[in-house]
């Protein structure tokens, strides 16, 4: 069964600290993996999209990594800011189909 | 470039009623997808339209339907509303195939409350 699991479900960190969010998937065949940031009450915004051949991709203070062998991805946030408080959603695309499998997200709260 | 717009932003209905939500994609985008988001379930895929044709459909009952017009604007309709239909309904647009690596741009959503 194609599934995407994210951990932790929620996370609280202090401003300025780094954190790493995890995404494990059992999607096959794999096409691409993307990370979204969703602020409360708003639609998700794309952070990164990675294909099978990409190991890492950065977008400012956000760095996503992908290990296609172990079917794991992580999103690392450097020097967190209050504006990073949001839900982060991992989405995996099933190859040769038009299907996207969504994780349930990690809720990140950054405190001053 | 204007983003994805959704109307209305908030809606309150009672059980048994029907509702129509509207989505205007980014200019030039031909693919429009609809999602339901609830706190416990996360984002659930409803359907995707491309050039006025439904290209993909999620596992929702037939009470949920949609359509896309020639200008790529899309509507979704929910008939015979149930309490469990209370959710944030998100629309996302992309130029072609969202699953193929195209970036999807999401609208702000319509928050539906069914009483």
Image (cartoon, rainbow, N blue to C red):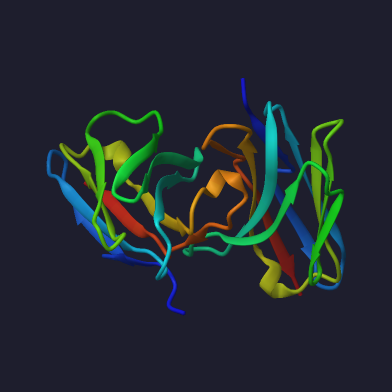
Image check: B93 left or right of A95?
left
Q: Quadrant of residue B55?
A: top left
At x 42%, y 68%, the residue is B26
Farthest bottom residue in view? B1
Image position, residue B73 (x, y; %): 29, 61
Q: Picture coordinates of residue A89 (x, y %)?
A: 63, 50
Left or right: where B6 falls relative to A92:
left
Q: Residue at x 40, y 57 (%)?
A: B30
Q: Residue furthest left?
A: B17
Residue A48 picture quarter: bottom right
Q: Position of residue A27 (x, y in %)?
A: 67, 29
Q: Position of residue B99 (x, y in %)?
A: 56, 44
Quadrant in which the N terminus of chain A is drawn: top right
Between residues B93 and B19, which one lies in front from this camera angle?
Answer: B93
Q: In the displayed structure, does residue A1 sit left or right of residue A20?
A: left
Question: Dividing the image into 4 quarters, which one contains the C terminus of chain A?
Answer: bottom right
- Viewer-proximal residue, A17 or B96? B96
Vertical placement of residue B101 versus A4, above or below: below
């Amino acid at each position: 069964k194609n599934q995407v699991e994210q951990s932790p479900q929620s996370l609280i960190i202090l401003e300025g600290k780094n954190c790493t969010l995890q995404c494990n998937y059992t999607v096959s065949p794999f096409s691409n993996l993307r990370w979204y940031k969703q602020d409360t009450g708003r639609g998700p915004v794309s952070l990164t999209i990675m294909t099978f051949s990409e190991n890492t991709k950065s977008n400012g203070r956000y760095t996503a990594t992908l290990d296609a062998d172990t079917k794991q991805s992580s999103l690392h946030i450097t020097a967190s800011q209050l504006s990073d408080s949001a839900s982060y959603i991992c989405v995996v695309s099933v190859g040769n189909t038009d299907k996207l499998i969504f994780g349930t997200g990690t809720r990140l709260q950054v405190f001053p | 470039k204007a983003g994805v717009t959704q109307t209305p932003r908030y809606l309150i209905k009672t059980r048994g009623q029907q509702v129509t939500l509207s989505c205007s994609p980014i200019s030039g985008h031909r693919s429009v997808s609809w999602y339901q988001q609830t706190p416990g379930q996360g984002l659930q895929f409803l359907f995707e339209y491309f050039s006025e044709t439904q290209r993909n459909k999620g596992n929702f009952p037939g009470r949920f339907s949609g359509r896309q017009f020639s200008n790529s604007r899309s509507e979704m309709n929910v008939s015979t509303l149930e309490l469990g239909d209370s959710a944030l309904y998100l629309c996302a647009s992309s130029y072609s195939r969202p699953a193929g690596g195209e970036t999807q741009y999401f609208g702000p959503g319509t928050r539906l409350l069914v009483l």
